[in-house]
């Protein structure tokens, strides 16, 4: 099977994950796909092919040299986003893309157009795999899986490329934030790994947000409004006062790059009680901590004004920037950087304005930056992947394997 054949086969499996089920994997389709992949990896002659009850599939390509070398892993996720159906995906290959509009579904007039998605124009002349406009494609992250498996086959077919032990890890439920949860880092047994789960060619990511959630509950005192003078405390107005004290421009809609924010994600209120929910994000750990302190400070201020116990705070850290775990092992980045150059790809280091499985894995002891898989417009009907981008990602994996052995 070629890289493209593999990819087209993989997207035929419906592996949409679900926030609702509370089990791992969250949907049975992921296990069906995992079993298929397990058979494929076994038929390729890989060793230690294991699939656990939670749907984590591991395998080993043994070293082809006696030189003592670190073990490096490549990871991709099997599920697709809950945001859109991944059932009956019916992909189509656009040959030699001409830079114009691509009609995905004529009946419903669904068009993939460079007017809305200018990044299409970076792929003129290439072969694009697109949807029929009714489902997502699933390049996120089946492109990553196809690239890893194809790179392994390439290494098997090119024994002149010396490499150490390589581990493969395919996990469920990344899209619901649980991909790393039951990932057995010890059993995986790697010195470091890469997730193949980024977008555009060249992406190399080893920084993500530090993240916390804050829920503030405001207690009011309801009194008949006709007799409320100096008696009533309207919790909605107290909450409003609290919200107004936070910096008005440190919000997602006013920030980019390395700028952090407070994001109001929910509010429900009556006179007696109002609850507001925020998420707090910042790449910089010191600024992240001071954002949390600011929330605590404002809660104290409200209590000083309206009486102790008026506002109560429920503050939780969610995840941290993997940078602090990558910095002590920067060769992990240097190797990926050089591998891209050797594969003819210009590396584009970018800070993720969100989280990643790799961040959680890094804090579980497996340094794990993220490399592009080539797909674009994730999680919806406009998702597409250039075949040339997948080929480049595959070559980056091959080059990494070779570079680790050549150091
Ligand atoms: Zn993904």
Image (tube, rainbow, N blue to C red):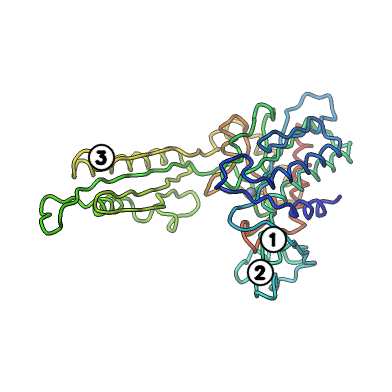
Report the residue at 53% width, 34% height from top: 324
Viewer-proximal residue among 255 and 263: 263
Secondary structure of residue under mark 2: strand
Which of disc 3 and disc 1 is earlier in sequence? 3
Position of residue 173 measured from the top left corner of the image (x, y, whole percent): 62, 44
Secondary structure of residue under mark 3: helix
101 up-or-down from 308: above or below: below
Q: In this view, does 384 lie to the left or right of 315?
A: right
Within 10 angstroms of label 1, few (less than 14), some, or many (20 or more) residues?
A: many
Report the residue at 64% width, 51% height from top: 16
Which of disc 1 and disc 2 is earlier in sequence? 2
Residue matched to label 1 = 384
Q: How far apart are marks 3 and 2 (CA)?
A: 51 Å
Position of residue 131 measured from the top left corner of the image (x, y, whole percent): 71, 63
Asked which quadrant contains residue 240, the reply is bottom left
Residue matched to label 3 = 300
Q: Distance between the residues labelled 1 and 3?
A: 50 Å
For the image, the number of numbered tags is 3
Which of disc 2 and disc 3 is earlier in sequence? 2
Position of residue 356 measured from the top left corner of the image (x, y, whole percent): 58, 43
Within 10 angstroms of label 2, few (less than 14), some, or many (20 or more) residues?
A: many
Position of residue 170 measured from the top left corner of the image (x, y, whole percent): 70, 40
Residue 406 in sight: no
Verify CB contact (< 8 Å) between mark 2 and mark 1: yes
């Amino acid at each position: 099977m070629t890289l493209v054949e593999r990819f087209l086969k993989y997207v035929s499996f419906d592996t949409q994950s679900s926030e609702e089920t509370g089990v791992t994997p969250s949907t049975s389709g992921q296990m069906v796909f995992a079993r298929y992949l397990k058979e494929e990896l076994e038929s390729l002659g890989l060793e230690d092919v294991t699939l656990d009850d939670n749907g984590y599939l591991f395998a080993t390509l043994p070293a082809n040299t006696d030189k003592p070398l670190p073990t490096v892993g490549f990871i991709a996720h099997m599920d697709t986003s809950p945001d859109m159906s991944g059932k009956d995906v019916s992909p189509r290959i656009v040959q030699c893309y001409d830079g114009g509009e691509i009609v995905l579904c004529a009946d419903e007039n669904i068009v993939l157009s460079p007017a809305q998605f200018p990044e299409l124009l970076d792929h003129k002349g290439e072969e694009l795999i697109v949807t029929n406009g009714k489902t997502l494609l699933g390049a996120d992250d089946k492109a990553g899986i196809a690239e890893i498996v194809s790179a392994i086959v390439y290494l098997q077919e090119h024994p002149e490329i010396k490499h150490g032990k390589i581990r493969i890890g395919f996990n469920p439920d990344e899209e619901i934030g649980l991909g790393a949860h039951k990932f057995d880092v010890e059993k995986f047994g790697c010195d470091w790994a890469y997730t193949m789960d980024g977008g555009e060619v060249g992406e190399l990511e080893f920084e993500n947000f530090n993240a916390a959630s804050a829920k503030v509950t405001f207690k009011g005192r309801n009194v008949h409004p006709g007799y409320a003078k100096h008696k009533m405390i309207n919790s909605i107005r107290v909450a409003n006062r609290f919200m107004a004290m936070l910096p008005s421009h440190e919000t997602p809609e006013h920030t980019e790059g390395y700028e952090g924010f407070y994001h109001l994600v929910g509010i429900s209120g009556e006179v007696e009680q109002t609850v507001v929910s925020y998420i707090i994000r910042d790449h910089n750990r010191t600024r992240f901590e001071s954002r949390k302190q600011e929330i605590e400070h404002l809660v104290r201020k409200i209590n000083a004004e309206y009486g102790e116990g008026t506002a109560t705070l429920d503050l939780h850290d969610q995840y941290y920037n993997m940078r602090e775990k990558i910095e002590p092992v920067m060769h992990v980045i240097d190797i990926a950087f050089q591998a891209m150059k050797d594969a003819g790809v210009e590396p584009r280091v970018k800070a993720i304005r969100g989280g990643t499985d790799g961040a959680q894995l890094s804090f579980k002891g497996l340094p794990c930056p993220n490399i592009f898989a080539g797909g674009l417009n994730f999680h919806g009907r406009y998702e597409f992947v250039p075949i040339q981008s997948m080929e480049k990602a595959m070559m980056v994996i091959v080059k990494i394997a070779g570079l680790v052995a050549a150091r």
